[in-house]
Image: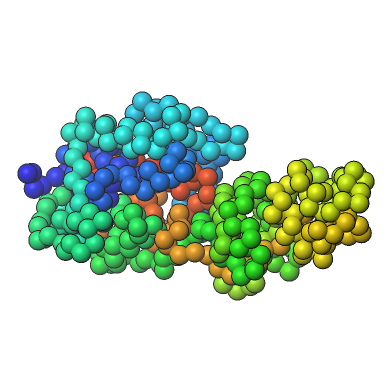
Amino acid sequence: MQNTYDVIVTGAGAAGLAAAVEAARAGASVLVLEKNHVPGRKILSTGAGKCNFSNASVTPARYHPPAAAFLKKTFAALPPAGVTAFFEGLGLLWVKEADGRLFPRSMRAQDVVGALSNELAFRGGRIQTLTEVTALTPGGGGFSVEACKVAPQWEKKAGRGEKFLLGARRVVLAAGGPCYPQIGGSASGAALLRALGHAVSALVPVIAPLRSGETFLKELDGVRAPVALRLMLDGEPLAESAGELLFTAYGVSGPAVLDLSRAAVTAMKDYKVYLEADFFPELTEKKLYALLEKRAALFAGRPLRHFACGLLNEKLIKAAALRCGLGWDAPIGPGLDGLAAMLKAFPVSVKGSLGFEDAMVTAGGCSLAEIDPATFASRLVPGLYVAGELLDLDGDSGGYNLHLAWTSGILAGRAAAKE
């Protein structure tokens, strides 16, 4: 096996594969080292297996912490349309949904990974799986890359293999973050950065389901509903979203919750916050009350459970009614104004978020002050490039994080091959 390469990429995730493809296209010899048994393991799980790979509304405002000056230079080097052009160049057809989310036309994440892997192989690049990078040592105009073979995750008792060394002129560090450790996520990339002298801020799980202490949640476990959702503080909205809300025994999840989760996690450091779900966003509270009054006339003398059937998921109506003091089996009577108000602003307390095991994205990471925004080259370590989730830059739910991974990977791969 060849021992020295123009470019070694650590991690065969979104950023790593994009970097490897671009470096190989430029004629560099490329080796990707991936500790999972297959490349693109986290990509395969995105978008419920469909891979929401980008969004039609990519702007610096979609990223956190605010980094407009950094991203302005990044998007000047590779405009957002350059990412879709990159995938079109791989032969991937894509579609845009009404909310701007972009998916492969096949709705198969495997096709995204396949298109990247096929192009890399065609260009002469290699992916070596079940291999973890344990140290990077600069010197002699390149790097000594220490790695070892590892067992697949299902062989939990198996130890690591012996360490071995590889040489690289340039290294693209794209090892991802600790989200989804059950499919290979870890903080190993952050450890490598710290060992090289980079400042790495605390890693925090964001875009994650939220925990709540509400007792009614056990009755609503598994219920889904389209809502307008508000994150509230002292009666005022901090952030808003719309989409599907999923109730679980521990709290709430679904796209509408994930869109607000970062704001919730940030606000909870200093304040108590809660969610308000509007189950009838198309109606004002006054119009909803009129609808309920009309419906009450239709079901006069009959129990509330008859009135509820066909109006909304019955479990939701029952939970809202009980919180308003209305009897589920009692005849319909006064109190529909309170029910209308509850259905327009159904409160759910927020106690925290789930951990890295359930989070889609990691916040925190390598300081942007130490990274060139147009090439993603390290300003501290010549020949090192940092891409993807290792950066202290995370986006909203909806394809923005994958878009940044592709963008940083493409720019890093191009630059690494040129030097």
Residue sitting at x 26%, y 41%: 20
Seen in the picture, residue 48 relative to 105 is either above or below; the reply is below
Q: How is the image coloured?
A: rainbow
Total numbered badges shown on the rendered structure: 0
Q: Does the rendering let one see residue 308?
A: yes
In terms of depth relative to the viewer, which is nearer, 207 or 340? 340
Q: Position of residue 75 (x, y in %)?
A: 46, 42
Residue sitting at x 35%, y 59%: 181
Residue sitting at x 38%, y 44%: 43
Residue sitting at x 83%, y 62%: 326
In terms of depth relative to the viewer, which is nearer, 29 or 68? 29
In the rendered view, does 323 fall on the left or right side of 269? Answer: right
Q: Position of residue 311 (x, y in %)?
A: 77, 45
Within the image, what quadrant is residue 315 found in?
A: bottom right
Q: Does the rendering let one see residue 264?
A: no
In terms of depth relative to the viewer, which is nearer, 284 or 100? 284
Q: Quadrant of the N terminus?
A: top left
Q: Quadrant of the C terminus?
A: top left
Q: Position of residue 99 (x, y in %)?
A: 60, 38
Seen in the picture, residue 91 relative to 313 is either above or below; the reply is above
In the rendered view, does 137 fall on the left or right side of 245? Answer: left
In the rendered view, does 217 fall on the left or right side of 365? Answer: right
Q: Position of residue 375 (x, y in %)?
A: 34, 46
